[in-house]
Image (cartoon, coloured by chain):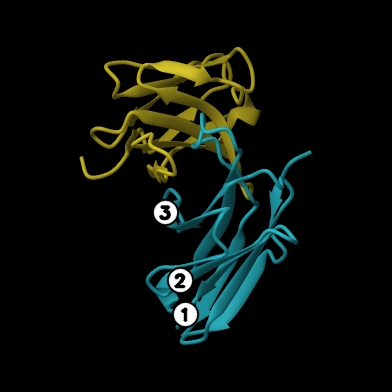
Amino acid sequence: GAGVSQSPSNKVTEKGKDVELRCDPISGHTALYWYRQSLGQGLEFLIYFQGNSAPDKSGLPSDRFSAERTGGSVSTLTIQRTQQEDSAVYLCASSSGGYNSPLHFGNGTRLTVT
Amino acid sequence: GESVGLHLPTLSVQEGDNSIINCAYSNSASDYFIWYKQESGKGPQFIIDIRSNMDKRQGQRVTVLLNKTVKHLSLQIAATQPGDSAVYFCAETPPGGTSYGKLTFGQGTILTVHP
């Protein structure tokens, strides 16, 4: 597609349930990132993929969070046993991976944990 | 710790005026800076970037200024339009060349343009 696509756009889940968030990056972009944006806050880095490998997972808040990327394209962010503090907008971005290549963001998935 | 912050959380201007949004950063080793615009319900949209070896860069109606002496970044928007109303974030990347997408974002400035 023309831009980064994320699904679902909104997700409401009960505390304790697992959720999967999907990201389709711009075709040909080798680098993919997940960020989290809490209400009224800036963006918080979660994880970075180059191809299918994740050289930087330092932003994942806990071991309940995991992400994978297959085929150098689609990525899935999984949150297990969701907690209310996980409520946020989860943003995916991709870039060509080159030096100074800007990130192109999707519109995010708004996750609400009740 | 290292952080990127903004001087003004909100800015209101009249249509046609020029806008200036400011950002302070604390990591003097950062070598790449970006401004993003975020409209309600959407993801951040790239506006303009600048490398640390530059002090000014111009785009269409926007100019970014970098003052490394005082670690200050600003975004100037000329002839501001109602469509410019959004939250503006500055972001920096650490040096090293390995994770240029690992941005540190400021908290954002809300720009409101009145017709």
Circle number at residue B45: 3
Chain B drawing hue = cyan
**Residues flagged by tags 3 and 1 on a common chain:** yes
Q: Is mark 3 on a helix, strand or loop?
A: strand
Q: Mark 2 points at which residue?
A: B62
Q: Give residue A21's position: percent from left, percent from top.
A: 41, 26
Q: How crowded is mark 2: few (under 14 residues within 10 Å), some or many (20 or more)?
A: some
Residue B80 rendering spot, x and y as whole percentages: 46, 79
Q: What element carries label 2?
A: strand
- Picture layout, residue B69 above or below residue A74: below
Horizontally, is B101 left or right of B96 in the view? Answer: left
Q: Which chain carries label 3?
A: B
> Residue at horizontal 63%, vertical 50%?
A40
**Residue A114 bears which disc, if any?**
none
The chain to which mark 1 is attached is B
In the rendering, which numbered label is found on residue B78?
A: 1
